[in-house]
Amino acid sequence: MPFFSVIIPLYNKEFFIKDTLSSVINQTFKDFEIIIIDDGSTDKSYDVVNSFNDDRIQIIRQKNSGLCASRNKGINHAKGKFIAFLDADDLWMVDFLETINYLIKNHPEQVVFATNVKLLKHNGFPELKAVPFETGNIKVITNFFKLLKNIMGPSSLVINKLVFENVGYFDENINYGEEDDFYIRCFSVYNLIYYKGFKTYYRIGLKNQLTAPNSNFIRKIPNYEKYLINNDNKDLQKFLDFVHFRLVVLFKMERNKDKVKFYKKKINVTTLTVVQKIKYYLPTFLFFYLKKTYLTFKRY
């Protein structure tokens, strides 16, 4: 049995999947299988993957069912003890799995592991070579909800398969915010063993990213507040304020005033930073144009 099962959901990423898959194959830690869920791609993504000659690669094709369904199918087919997720346009440094293996050896009693992640612009050049492991970069996070910031991405997360049997899989009834929904269930039970050095690249600025503003995309967002029932973690409400604030920013960029108003009502403003409060109170139209102007100048 492989030690890691690498799950890559794939939908119309023909220009990125080759580099993504190569970043897995080139890992210094070799004991893994790769499960690619082709979620009804209509471009040449499947052909690109099929051109690889590696017995560790398994391709499963399905009709378009969404990211959560793809991840769940990968989990169900996984033979490894640990599940490593990788989006089809993200990249691993060559020692990502080796770093996770070190974390597991240092904390064999733990089941959830992650590394830091670095943003990669669409025209950026990633450095994927190995960087020496430093034990001083290991951090045991016993209260994930207290962080109130993004310290990882789904492509830098590795989980013991038993966790899903305990807290459940990804919710296939939603198509946005699925990571936060899972994090709430996961970190209400488990600690996170975190490596502060970045070992993953997350691409930004792509046109078809689900996280990008898109007023034509009908978002099915979780009702996060249901998790406040019978949860005695006092920091969960602050974490939900953080999650809802990000939704306010998203819908301001989509100029969806109704959704902005809806999610603003869910936030205790006193938990926000000064900068977040400014963004919270700025009228939607003004926030949108200021942000667009900032992003335009940032490109140059």
Image: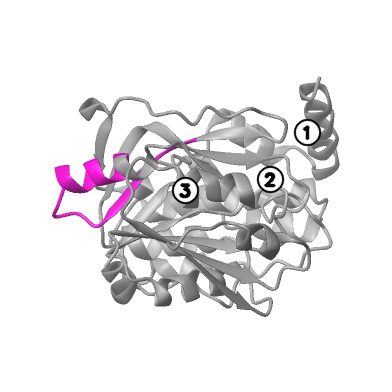
- SS at badge 1: helix
Q: Which residues are magenta?
A: 99-117
The residue depicted at 27 percent of the width and 59 percent of the height is 3
167 over 131 or under it: above or below: below
Which circle marks residue 249 in the picture?
A: 2
- Residue situated in front as seen by the camera: 151 or 95: 95
**What amino acid is labelled 3 in the image?**
Val
How packed mark 3 is, by other alpha carbons closer than 10 Å (few <14, some 14-19, many 20 or more), is many
Which circle marks residue 291 in the picture?
A: 1
Q: Position of residue 222 (x, y in %)?
A: 56, 68
**What amino acid is labelled 2 in the image?**
Val
Mark 3 or mark 1, whichever is nearer to me = 3
Side of 52 where 108 appears, left or right:
left
Side of 127 where 103 appears, left or right:
left
Magenta highlight on residue 202: no
- SS at badge 2: helix
Q: Position of residue 15 (x, y in %)?
A: 72, 48
**What amino acid is labelled 1 in the image?**
Lys
Pointer 3 residue: 24
How packed mark 2 is, by other alpha carbons closer than 10 Å (few <14, some 14-19, many 20 or more), is many
Which corner quadrant of the image does residue 13 belong to? bottom right
Q: Position of residue 2 (x, y in %)?
A: 30, 62
The residue depicted at 28 percent of the width and 74 percent of the height is 166
